[in-house]
């Protein structure tokens, strides 16, 4: 027999405490997810599915099997504990975006004075900050390598420092992503199409660092399938429960596709 929500609360007052204990992390999580959607850290579709999942924890705790309450409380707090990790991942991504902007600014300055060695070296420095040591060395040595030490003391010191850190053999050429031409190390504008082709190298690795969306979508899929289907079979007729399960699997698949960016690869 199903108890009404009101009966359940009056008959088992200890559950009210547990339910409040669950709704606190649920509300904190919901606010965080809305914040991510506003800031564009996650797209709206994945954000809404995540929001639906978080609120689902709260409603399952209120209306589902009592035995589930401690498990749901654990899930809610464990999910909140993931937050520092998520924040750290975001902070890292923001740093990378800042570094890419430094590369773009250096390129803009070079566009006005393409042969200026100091500006070229600034680009090399931006590559180094971006973790692209081989590019920093090739651009840096081509810009000031043949110029006197006395004229560019800081640059020569930086370059020597980078060379000490170099671990990998630099590539023989750097391919332009626009026209496909293989440029020599040290070229900053493509020798065939004239484009600032090295920007693609600076931007390449941050796209794979979209860990937060992957994490969020895995979390959504896991919760929907484990708890959502369990709840459906407890609360509904088998036929309805099967239908709900199919829907939940569909929503989970959708979240995973959004989170791992498969739709971009297909398109
Ligand atoms: Zn090109």
Image (tube, grey):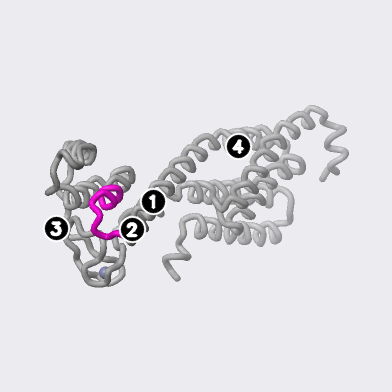
As helix, strand or loop, the secondary structure at mark 2 comes to: helix
Q: Which residue is mark 2?
A: 199
Residue 199 drawn at (x, y percent) = 33, 58
**Structural crowding at the residue carrying mark 4, measured as other residues with C-alpha within 10 Å and reported as few (<14), some (14–19) or many (≥20):** some
Magenta residues (range): 113-123
- Which residue bears the numbered disc 1? 100
Which residue is nearer to you in this view: 61 or 26? 26
Return the residue found at the far front: 151
Which mark, by number, is residue 172?
3
Asked if residue 91 shows in the view, the reply is yes
Q: Of helix, strand and loop, which one carries label 1?
A: helix
Callout in the foreground (1, 3): 1
Q: Quadrant of ligand 1?
A: bottom left
Discs 4/3, front: 3
Q: Earlier in the sequence, mark 4 or mark 2?
A: 4
Q: Is residue 180 above or below residue 155?
A: below
User: Magenta includes 185?
Assistant: no
Mark 4 vs mark 3: which is more N-terminal? 4
Quarter of the picture containing the C terminus is bottom left
Q: Nearer the viewer, residue 8 or 237?
A: 8
Q: CA distance from mark 4 to mark 2?
A: 42 Å
Label 1, label 3: how many angstroms apart (C-alpha)? Answer: 24 Å
Q: What quarter of the picture does the N terminus occupy?
A: top right
Label 3: which secondary element: loop
Task: Please say if the residues under marks 1 and 2 sit with CB atoms less than 8 Å apart.
Answer: yes
Q: Is residue 115 magenta?
A: yes
- Please identify, in this view, whether the residue under mark 4 or under mark 2 is nearer the observer: 2
In the visual, does 259 lie left or right of 136? right
Q: Residues within 10 Å of mark 1 (few under 14, many from 20)?
A: many
Secondary-structure class at tag 4:
helix
Q: Residue at x 34, y 53 (%)?
A: 106
Residue indicated by mark 4: 75
């Amino acid at each position: 027999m199903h108890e009404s929500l009101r009966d359940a609360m009056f008959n088992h007052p200890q559950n009210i405490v547990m339910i409040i204990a669950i709704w606190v992390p649920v509300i904190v999580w919901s606010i965080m997810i809305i914040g991510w959607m506003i800031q564009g850290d996650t797209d709206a579709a994945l954000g809404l599915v995540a929001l639906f999942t978080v609120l689902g924890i709260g409603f399952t705790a209120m209306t589902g099997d009592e035995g589930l309450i401690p498990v749901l409380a654990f899930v809610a707090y464990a999910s909140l504990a993931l937050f520092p990790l998520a924040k750290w991942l975001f902070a890292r991504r923001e740093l990378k975006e800042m570094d890419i902007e430094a590369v773009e600014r250096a390129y803009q300055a070079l566009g006005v004075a393409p042969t200026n060695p100091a500006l070229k070296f600034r680009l090399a420095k931006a590559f180094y900050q971006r973790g692209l040591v081989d590019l920093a060395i090739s651009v840096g040595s081509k810009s000031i390598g043949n110029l006197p030490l006395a004229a560019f003391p800081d640059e020569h010191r930086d370059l020597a420092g980078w060379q000490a850190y170099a671990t990998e053999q630099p590539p023989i050429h750097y391919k332009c992503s626009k026209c496909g031409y293989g440029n020599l190390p040290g070229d900053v504008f493509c020798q065939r199409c004239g484009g600032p082709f090295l920007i693609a190298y600076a931007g390449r690795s941050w796209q794979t660092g979209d860990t937060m969306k992957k994490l969020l979508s895995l979390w959504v899929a896991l919760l929907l399938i484990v708890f959502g289907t369990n709840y459906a079979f407890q609360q509904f007729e088998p036929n309805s429960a099967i239908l709900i399960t199919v829907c939940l699997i569909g929503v989970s698949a959708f979240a995973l596709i959004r989170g791992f960016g498969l739709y971009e690869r297909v398109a």
